[in-house]
Amino acid sequence: MNDTARERILSRLDAAGLAKERPGAVESPAPETWRREEKIRRLQSQMEAMRTEVHVVEADRWIDRLKAIVRKREWKEIVCGAGSVIATELQSAWEGGGDGLPKQVFYEERIESFKEYLFTVDAGVTSTVGAVADTGAVILWPTPAEPRTLSLVPPVHIALVDADQIFVSLDEAMQAQGWKDRMPANALLISGPSKTADIEFTLVFGVHGPKEMIVLIKT
Amino acid sequence: METAPSFDFKKNIEKALSDAQLRKNLRSAMDILVAKRKTVFPDADMLERLRTKGNALKRNALIQLPRLLERLEANCTKNGIQVHWAETAPEANGIVLEILRRHDAAEVVKGKSMVSEEMHLNHFLAENGIDALETDLGEFIIQLNHETPSHIIVPAIHKNRDEVARIFCEKIPDTPYTENVEALTAIARKTLRARFARAKAGISGVNMAVAETGTLVLVENEGNGRMCTTVPEVHIAVMGIEKVVERLSDVPPLLRLLTGSATGQVITTYVNMITSPRKPGEKDGPKEVHLVLLDNGRSRILADPAFRETLLCIRCGTCLNHCPVYVRIGGHAYGHVYPGPIGKLLTPMMEGLSRAGELPAASSLCGACEAVCPVKIPIASLLRRLRHENVRENPNSVVEGSGVGKNLAETLVWKGWVLANLQPALNRLGVKGVSWMGDRLPRIGPLKEWTSVRTAPRFAGKTLHERIKEDEIVKSRNWDGKVKSSRCKARKF
């Protein structure tokens, strides 16, 4: 049944005389080149405009900054990927909570059994594979260690960006990282907390995705 | 299958025009969207280059459409996405139903998809005992109120906060009345979260599908799309066949055009690129991903070199935002799935001129839509072409109902007009008549509304031709210096 629909659609398309059209010339403007400082600055300002809390920290001090952020919030538990690089680094520095710090929980189970917990936890921490400065977004490629819902379900998403992995544009990121030959199951650009303006164009943050987003740029 | 009630366009228009609240809402909403677009594209030259590029990319995709669809299917299948083809909306509905039944999914969550509106999917699923809950806030609001979307991008734009407050209070259990927009959004978040957590399947549309990698690209601000396509164990994506693009590198410019034109953003909160279901070792993501490719008349429209440009559309909605007709009547008045300028093209093309022949006439051909279309669809010319098809029988037309709008009175008027301009004697008579009667025309009858608010011109006693002859104002000469005769050639129509 399905094959018939497929064959009929394709044969109608083949008979439509499409190949007679002249293809259009696709020009690409010369790409922008920004220095590292400029890329960091642009990423920060674009994301802050979309209500993201952005911190620029020295690479070896990110855990201290995270601790400071987290203590202020009085969270009970935060979730990170099990076996991820972050989890390992955090674990040694966190040592099981206390001292005003929330308990560290690892996303070890499948979503089917972890779902109920995930919908109640305070925050999720993920790494990123880069960021895009011109539009202000971080790039996530979820992995077995850091699943997709880690950056989606908890009401706060904390993302770690390596300043050396900030690209000027999505185009540059796709080329530099060779996306077309290795697309993951799910690739994401995230530019801030979830939002809507569907009611009278009044902008409200925190709809179905996280209500808050915190980005730590490690220099 | 098509159970829409008979479509009284005139009545819809009158109703909309006399609804002061609707007009006020629409005016302010469209003004906001127009301003946002201007702000996000500050450089006119850059925008123009981007539009040219968008047009070229989409055209090139249409030119290669059958091969790209095959490539998309091959890559999707290789990555584990199951691809289905449907010629008609009922076929597509059947495919979706079969997948849902296989998984015993009685409740599904849905992201916004205009193709699913074309399919009347929610209604079909409800008839078959499946509850499809809209999760985009605007769609959620209108679904509660049993309405259809009035705009492609902001479906509840015609609703005020007090109307939303009343809908939530009445239709969602244990909900107090509040007009606070933050509180209303929080109510929606709470209500929908429970559904995201337990739905067995999620349905979404597709903004663009990349043939090169077998990737589905979806954009959104709220996070409901990611919820629908990530949490449930089954994800079904429905897509019109024209949404395929060739390369991954086509995505950035088209995204920029789409988000800038639709909501005035440089980027949406989320850009979600799906290439496969949950891979071994991964802890979340749907176990099954299905892609339903819908034709519904698109392959027929593609056979016409002019009409095929309609399928460049990336569904941004900006033509609606700039249209002087849309801002005055709103989306519901159009009576079909797609409103606004693009709707006036798509509806007659898909449903035929017998049903929708009046739509292309509801335009002043001002061309504002064309000037802003991110992929440069020549909307005004195509509207004129459809009007032409409406009154001239064309046995080769790709559009059903060509010639259906032809009527004796109009034909006679136009024949008379041609005659009066081709026959010199008739022409002179007609002109004399106008110069004699013109100033004496009473302001009554069909022209009253037009003449009552304008100052009429004064008609001269003699025509310009007569004055030229009498006063010998101008003599035109041939190349050999001889004076040209003053007769002009009649043009064939």
Image (cartoon, coloured by chain):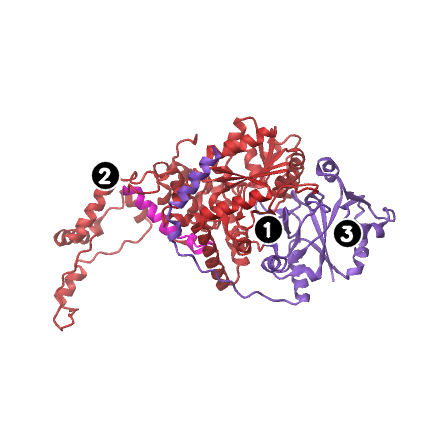
Chain colours: A purple, B red
Confirm or deny contact between disc 2 and disc 1 (CB under 8 A). Answer: no
Q: Which residue is mark 2?
A: B408
- The three-letter code of the residue at mark 3 reads Ile
Circle 2 crowding by C-alpha within 10 Å: few under 14, some 14–19, many from 20: few
Q: Is residue B326 left or right of residue A162?
A: left
- Chain of the residue that carries numbered disc 1 in the rendered image: B
Q: Dot 1: what SS? A: loop
The span from disc 2 to disc 3 (Cα, nearest Å) is 78 Å
Write the residue at 68% across / 48% down.
A142
| Circles 2 and 3 on the same subunit | no
The span from disc 2 to disc 1 (Cα, nearest Å) is 52 Å
Asked if B1 appears above or below B378 in the picture, the reply is above
Label 2 or label 3, whichever lies nearer to me, is 3
**How far across and how far down the image is residue B199, in percent?**
64, 33
- The three-letter code of the residue at mark 2 reads Leu
Magenta range: B369-393
Residue A41 placement: quadrant? bottom right
- The three-letter code of the residue at mark 1 reads Thr
User: Who comes first in sequence, dot 2 or dot 1?
Assistant: 1
Main SS class of the magenta portion in the image: helix
Q: Quadrant of the C terminus of chain A?
A: bottom right
**How far across and how far down the image is residue B11, in percent?**
39, 36
Q: Which residue is mark 1?
A: B268
- Chain of the residue that carries numbered disc 2 in the rendered image: B
